[in-house]
Amino acid sequence: MRGISLLMYHQVGKFPPMRSHRATYCDVDRFRRQMAWLRAFRYHVLDMDQVAACLSGARPVPPRAVALTFDDGYENFLTHAAPILERHGFPAIVYVVPTLLGRPARWLAADGHATPRLMDAGQLRELQARGFTIGSHNLVHERMAGQPPEVQYQTARDSKARLEDLLGRPCHHFCYPYGSHDAASLQALARAGYRTGVTCQRATATADFDPLALPRKAVSFGDSLAGVLWKLHAKHRPKRPPLRR
Ligand SMILES: [Zn+2]
C-alpha cells in the first residue's frame, strides 16, 4: 500500500551548533536543500485536505507523497520557511495554540530551550492569505493523554472555534501537543469535527492508521540530507500499535 510521509518540523532558522539530534530545530540552509530535493525529484507535496482524501480512498495516493507540517507556529516560520516553500509552490500546515498567539513559547523553558515568539493573529491571517493552512495545536500546550474525555473534547472544540473566529475559515486539522493522545483524544477530535490529527509516532501514514492519529517523521537538527531521505523512504513500524477509534 502506498503511503504518505508527513514530515514534522518545529523551528526553522539559524541556531548555535547542538550536540544532540534536536528534533525541534532545523537549520534554514538544510531546510532549503531538503525542499530543493523534493522539487528536483518531483515529490508530490500534499496539503492536509489532500492527505485526508488520499487516505480515505477518495483519491489515489500519488507516488513519492509528502506533506509538510510545522508545530507551534513560531515567527521563524514566517521569516525563514514560508519564502522557501513559496518559491517551490509547496503547501504546508502550521499548528498553532490560539491562547498563546504573539507570546513567547514558554513551555520550552522547562527543557532549557530559548523561548521564541509565536506568531500573532495578524501574522496567521497573512500566512493564510498566502495559501498556508492553519491547524489547531489545542487550546493550551499541554499533554492530552489521561485528561478526562470531556475536558479533551472541550479544549479540542474550543481551539477549533477560536481559530475559525480569528481566521474566518473552517479548521479541520489538529496536532496533539507533545504527540500525547489516548483513545479519548481520538473520540474528542471526531466529536469536535476534525478531519485529521497528527502524532509524533514515526511511520509512513497509510489507510491503516486512523486519520485522527496519523504518524509523522521528525526532521532533526542533526539530519543530513541523506538522513532525511532515509526517513522519507523507510516505513518505520511504529513502536506501539497505533490507536484506532
Ligand atoms: Zn508543540
Image (tube, helix red, strand yellow):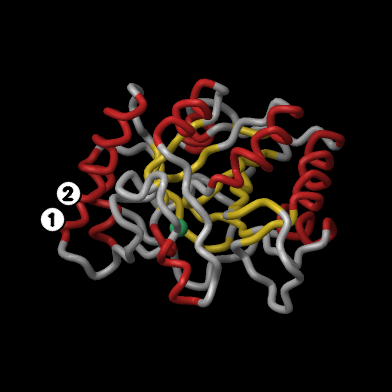
Q: Quadrant of residue 64?
A: top right
- Residue drawn at point x = 75 percent, y = 29 percent: 88
Please indicate whether residue 156 sits to the left or right of residue 137 in the image: left
Q: Circle 1 sits in a helix, a strand or a loop, which is it?
A: helix
Q: Quadrant of residue 89?
A: top right
Picture layout, residue 124 above or below residue 228: above
Residue 136: percent from the left, percent from the top? Answer: 37, 43
Q: Amino acid at mark 1?
A: Glu
- CA distance for labels 2 and 1: 6 Å
- Residue drawn at point x = 61 percent, y = 34 percent: 61
Q: Circle 2 sits in a helix, a strand or a loop, which is it?
A: helix
Circle 2 residue? 154
Find out whether the residues at labels 2 and 1 contact each other: C-beta distance under 8 Å.
yes
- Residue drawn at point x = 24 percent, y = 35 percent: 161
Asked whether the viewer can see residue 211, the reply is no
Task: Count neighbours of disc 2 (C-alpha within 10 A) and say few if under 14, some if 14 to 19, many if 20 or more.
Answer: some
Q: Amino acid at mark 2?
A: Gln
Picture layout, residue 203 above or below residue 46: below
Task: Count neighbours of disc 1 (C-alpha within 10 A) and say few if under 14, some if 14 to 19, many if 20 or more.
Answer: few
Q: Nearer the viewer, residue 173 or 230?
A: 173
Please indicate whether residue 148 sits to the left or right of residue 240 in the image: left
Circle 1 residue? 150
Please indicate whether residue 245 sits to the left or right of residue 45 in the image: left
Asked whether the viewer can see residue 24, the reply is yes
